Image (tube, rainbow, N blue to C red):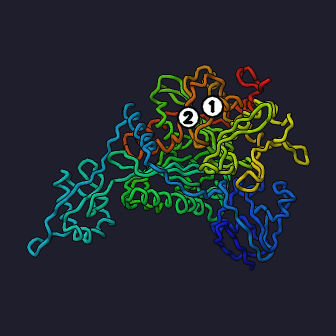
């Protein structure tokens, strides 16, 4: 056995024993060491870099590490095996999956206003935000030798009188605490629970008044976002986000499904999302709001079909295998204690309903928040994340589909790609004459660039094409100081040199990256085209295009059109609506009426399986060009003369 030491940039270390020949990336996973591995260790992404500090590793050759980098100690963890005692440095860069958790600052009121507007808009469309949760103050007679009624009967009678109900259900957790709370409060207490007809389900008894809370959670393949809200007023109490802990098992759902199929895999992935991601988020929001986790009485989760299965610990393998049948579309009955979530044990966990194997609850929740179902005009809803999902329709009908765009929109499959967090370049312009870039970075002033997020990649490719630096095939055709080529002649555009970046590695986009992104944008446009053609329509019928997802603070719609990702229609028809999945989950967490509405939307939405559509592959191949092989579809998109 050998000692393997993972050293972090903050000075901390993790030591694990390993047998000769053990894979370094697998060892890191077993020790819960965060190493970015979007390809799940198949050697294709080149992002699982570690630096050899001492000892030796048996390493496979790779084109992702240059000779200079190898001499400096850099290795790919997925291609390294143990052959003795070894110490490696794990870089703490913003592209790593376990990015620092962020709790939103609500003091400006902007975040609160967004959710208040959502409540108003959904309410105006006929969805009630009333719910059955109740909090009531009770003053009970203290027991005496002449009044020996037990505590449970005493509070039951008080609740029946105060609420006019016939039955009170007291769960085990409340019964255990009842005697202490009643006496600490001198038999003056606050009771919180849910009223269903003539039955009151007691959830908490406390000596003082505290908010009744709900949590809404958007579990993205890459990022998890959540809000904590007051159940009675809808007021936002806290908001937080972090990376999805599952990402070390692969950047896309297919790699995650493969991983969960291995022995112990389902438990590993469930633990990664619950113990490492959701519970820290819930606890952080409770601390921020100044409430205990036991005051969360209802939760709603919106996520894609695979994430739903992995959250519940349900086998997801049939989702990826023809005929692509998930274990459930709609399922109710889950409690927080079933998943060991940091909330009241009896809190209902509402799962936003799935539509198909690759169109899940994140889309049904997003459609609810988008109000597409309340419009007369033809509207296209596009969610850009690790996957690309679309919904088209109006109040009369809706059709949905999903395309295998891959993780490119969140920086996956891109050499310097990263998600939209501190250090990410989110917007780019290029001077056509000098070929010099100007860009905007997420984070504080003075922040050096780490990589490119989705919106920055769209801008950069659009600008490279507009300036004639790359051809319609994505190959470099102009030379300049910013264009460099490797020994094989493959070109790349350098946004930031080694000295200018935060990591000591240049931030650049090469022809392989551009090809990957062209395929991703081609998947989106061909999905739009195929879905409309299946209805004997084309892009001219579109009145609105709603773009959702977390690829940046908002993409430049003109640039997205210029590269052929979105249809070439009036730019005023496009609207970026942010994280609609989280917004829909918020509405469902507060409102049983919104929950039922979402079930109805899912049930009435037609699902188009693109993989079996005979015209989709031809449409995809035609779209893998800048902007498209059929230039008549994009009359306003062309390089500058």
Of residue 103 and residue 259, the one placed in the foreground of this image is 103
Tell me the quarter of the image containing the N terminus.
Answer: bottom right
Is residue 180 toward the left or the right of residue 304 in the image?
left
Rendering coords of residue 513 (x, y %): 77, 43
Q: Secondary structure at mark 2?
A: strand
- Mark 2 and mark 1 in contact (Cβ < 8 Å)? yes
Rendering coords of residue 465 (x, y %): 77, 32
Residue holding disc 2: 576
**Cα separation between marks 1 and 2:** 9 Å
The image shows residue 386, relative to residue 247, as above or below, that is above
The image shows residue 229, relative to residue 149, as above or below, that is above
The image shows residue 425, relative to residue 564, as above or below, that is below
In this orientation, does residue 495 appear? yes
**Which quadrant would residue 259 be assigned to in this image?**
bottom right
Is residue 191 toward the left or the right of residue 634 in the image?
left
Residue 557, numbered label: 1
Seen at 69% across and 49% down, the residue is: 449
Seen at 43% across and 48% down, the residue is: 107
Rendering coords of residue 276 (x, y %): 55, 62
Q: Residues within 10 Å of mark 1 (few under 14, many from 20)?
A: many
Seen at 53% across and 63% down, the residue is: 275
Whichever of callouts 1 and 2 sits on the residue coming sooner in the sequence is 1
Q: Residues within 10 Å of mark 2 (few under 14, many from 20)?
A: some
**Which quadrant would residue 108 be assigned to in this image?**
top left
């Amino acid at each position: 056995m050998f000692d393997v030491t993972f050293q972090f940039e903050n000075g901390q270390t993790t030591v694990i024993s390993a047998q000769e020949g053990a894979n370094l990336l697998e060892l890191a996973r077993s020790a819960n060491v965060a190493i970015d591995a979007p390809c799940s260790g198949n050697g294709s992404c080149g992002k699982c870099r570690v630096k050899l500090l001492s000892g030796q590793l048996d390493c496979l050759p790779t084109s992702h590490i240059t000779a200079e980098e190898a001499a400096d100690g850099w290795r790919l963890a997925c291609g390294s095996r143990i052959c003795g005692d070894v110490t490696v440095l794990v870089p703490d860069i913003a592209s790593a999956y376990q990015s620092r958790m962020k709790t939103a600052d609500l003091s400006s009121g902007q975040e609160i206003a967004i959710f208040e507007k959502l409540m108003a808009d959904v309410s105006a469309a006929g969805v009630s935000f009333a719910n059955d949760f109740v909090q009531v103050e009770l003053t009970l007679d203290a027991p005496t030798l002449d009044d020996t009624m037990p505590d449970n009967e005493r509070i039951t009678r008080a609740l029946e009188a105060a609420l006019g109900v016939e039955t009170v259900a007291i769960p085990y957790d409340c019964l255990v605490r009842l005697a202490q709370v009643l006496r600490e409060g001198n038999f003056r207490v606050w009771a919180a629970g849910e009223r269903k007809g003539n039955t009151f389900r007691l959830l908490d008894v406390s000596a003082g008044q505290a908010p009744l809370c709900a949590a809404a959670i958007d579990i993205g393949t890459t990022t998890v976002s959540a809000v904590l809200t007051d159940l009675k007023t809808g007021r936002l109490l806290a908001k937080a986000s972090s990376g999805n802990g599952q990402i070390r098992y692969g950047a896309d759902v297919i790699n995650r499904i493969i991983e969960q199929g291995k022995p112990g895999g389902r438990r590993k992935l469930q633990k990664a999302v619950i113990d490492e991601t959701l519970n820290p988020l819930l606890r952080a929001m409770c601390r921020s709001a100044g409430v205990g986790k036991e005051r969360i009485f209802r939760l709603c989760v919106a996520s894609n079909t695979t994430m739903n299965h992995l959250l519940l610990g349900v086998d997801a393998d049939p989702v990826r295998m023809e005929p692509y049948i998930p274990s459930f579309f709609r399922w109710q009955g889950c409690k927080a204690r079933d998943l060991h979530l940091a909330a009241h044990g009896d809190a209902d966990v509402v799962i936003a309903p799935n539509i198909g194997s690759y169109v899940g609850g994140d889309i049904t929740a997003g459609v609810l928040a988008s109000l597409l179902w309340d419009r007369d005009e033809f509207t296209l809803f596009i969610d850009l994340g690790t996957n690309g999902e679309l919904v088209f329709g109006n109040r009369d009908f809706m059709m949905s589909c999903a395309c295998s765009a891959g993780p490119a929109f969140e920086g996956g499959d891109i050499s310097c790609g990263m998600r939209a967090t501190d250090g990410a370049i989110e917007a780019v312009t290029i001077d056509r004459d000098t070929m010099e870039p100007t860009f905007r970075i997420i984070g504080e002033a003075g922040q050096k660039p780490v990589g490119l997020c989705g919106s920055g990649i769209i801008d950069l490719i659009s600008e490279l094409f507009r300036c004639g630096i790359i051809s319609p095939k994505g190959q470099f055709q102009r030379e300049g100081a910013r264009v460099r080529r490797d020994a094989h002649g493959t070109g790349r555009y350098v946004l930031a040199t080694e000295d200018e970046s935060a990591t000591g590695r240049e931030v650049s986009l090469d022809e392989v990256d551009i090809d990957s992104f062209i395929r991703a944008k081609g998947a989106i446009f061909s999905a739009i085209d195929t879905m409309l053609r299946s209805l004997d329509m084309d892009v001219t019928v579109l009145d609105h295009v709603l773009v959702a997802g977390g690829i940046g603070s908002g993409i430049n719609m003109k640039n997205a059109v210029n590269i052929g990702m979105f249809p070439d229609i009036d730019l005023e028809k496009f609207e970026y609506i942010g994280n609609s999945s989280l917004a829909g989950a918020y509405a469902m967490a507060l409102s049983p009426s919104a929950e039922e509405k979402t079930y109805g939307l899912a049930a009435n939405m037609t699902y188009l399986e693109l993989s079996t559509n005979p015209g989709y592959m031809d449409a995809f191949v035609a779209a893998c060009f800048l902007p498209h092989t059929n230039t008549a579809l994009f009359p306003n998109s062309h390089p500058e003369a």
